[in-house]
């Protein structure tokens, strides 16, 4: 087919099509359904294997409970500062909302915790009306880690009057909720230094039933987005597209050793 794109040394690519697997729905559309503990384990485990800018509407799900992350517009370097309006407020980490301290990749762990809590309870965990109310809703549930954390904040009045403890026991919905509650407790830490990383979260006992360590891969190098900032002509972009097609080597898909056997 590539030869069909060549005409007298020129590349003719008037249209580009990306063929992807069909995903029946997204998590936002089925969030009102009741999820079994097994489905929550399987879906959250898949979220943690690929993170960035998470909210239910960015998580496509098919009839076999297989999940794929959509919208990679922010899947870039973690040191590029985000603002409080980048992702849906209800799933934002507090350090992003208020810019109260430098943050890292664990902003996405917070998002996973919010989504998981919503799947457990059927309700949005932190449903703030604006950024200050969002913080209030968060602190009502988490409380404050302690004076050491407060001293890290530039505006210490933001946390005045809130309890210095946290409790997720109200999220206990199933007969054996302890592992789920423990995972939430560790993902929804206000102090980014104490919040779980993706690697630590994947190793949590809550996912033992579905875990496949061989499928848990980490990027070997940072994503190079320098090409995206270049000002190129249409013909030059066509040339880059053609070269990318030519250099692409598809990798044979390896089916998971632990397929869920579940359906929506």
Image: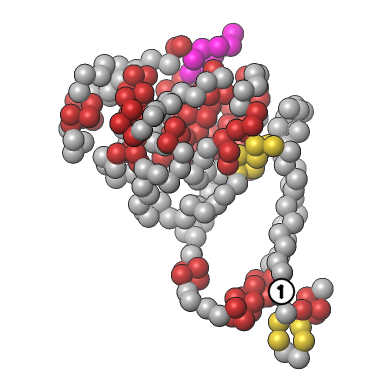
Q: Residue furthest bottom?
A: 8
**Residue 201 visible in the current orientation:** no
**Residue 214 screen position, x and y as percent:** 63, 42
**Viewer-proximal residue among 135 and 46:** 135
Left or right, residue 85 beside residue 121: left
Rendered image coloring scheme: secondary structure
* 34 is higher (above) or lower (below) than 151: above
Q: Which residue is at a point 37% across and 55% down the rendered structure image? A: 80
Q: Is residue 177 magenta?
A: yes
Q: Is residue 139 left or right of residue 56?
A: left
> Which picture quadrant has residue 68?
top right
The region drawn magenta spans 171-181
Which quadrant: the C terminus?
top right
Q: Is residue 125 among the parts visible in the rendering?
A: yes
**At 60% across and 44% down in the image, what residue appears?**
69
**Residue at the image position 51 percent from the left and 40 percent from the top:** 54
Write down the residue under mark 1: 14
- Tell me: residue 167, above or below residue 245: above
Name the spot of residue 150 as percent of width and height, x first. 20, 30
Residue at 71% across, 82% down: 11
Q: Position of residue 94 (x, y in %)?
A: 34, 35
* Observer-nearest of 85 and 69: 85
- Assess disc 1: are there few (<14), some (14-19) or many (≥20) residues with their C-alpha within 10 Å of its C-alpha: few
On the image, the x and y values in percent for residue 247 come to 67, 72
Which residue, as the protein is rendered here, is positioned at the far front? 129
Pick the quarter of the image with the N terminus.
bottom right
Q: Callout 1: helix, strand or loop?
A: loop
């Amino acid at each position: 087919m590539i030869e069909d794109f060549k005409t007298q040394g020129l590349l003719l690519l008037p249209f580009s099509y990306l063929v992807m697997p069909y995903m029946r729905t997204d998590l936002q559309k089925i969030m009102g359904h009741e999820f079994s503990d097994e489905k929550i384990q399987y879906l959250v485990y898949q979220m943690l294997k690929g993170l960035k800018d998470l909210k239910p509407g960015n998580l496509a799900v098919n009839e076999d409970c297989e999940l794929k992350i959509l919208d990679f517009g922010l899947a870039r370097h973690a040191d590029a500062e985000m603002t409080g309006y980048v992702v849906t407020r209800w799933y934002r980490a507090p350090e992003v909302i208020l810019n109260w301290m430098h943050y890292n990749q664990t902003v996405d762990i917070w998002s996973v915790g919010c989504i998981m809590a919503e799947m457990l309870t059927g309700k949005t965990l932190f449903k703030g009306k604006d950024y200050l109310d969002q913080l209030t809703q968060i602190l009502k549930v988490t409380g404050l880690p302690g004076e050491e954390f407060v001293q890290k904040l530039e505006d210490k009045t933001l946390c005045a009057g809130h309890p210095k403890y946290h409790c997720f026991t109200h999220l206990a919905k199933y007969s054996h909720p302890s592992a789920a509650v423990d995972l939430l407790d560790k993902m929804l830490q206000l102090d980014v230094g104490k919040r779980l990383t993706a690697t630590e979260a994947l190793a949590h006992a809550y996912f033992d039933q579905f875990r496949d360590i061989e499928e848990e891969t980490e990027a070997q190098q940072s994503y190079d987005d320098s090409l995206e900032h270049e000002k190129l002509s249409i013909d030059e972009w066509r040339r880059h597209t053609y070269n990318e097609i030519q250099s692409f080597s598809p990798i044979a898909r390896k089916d998971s050793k632990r397929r869920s056997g579940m359906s929506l």
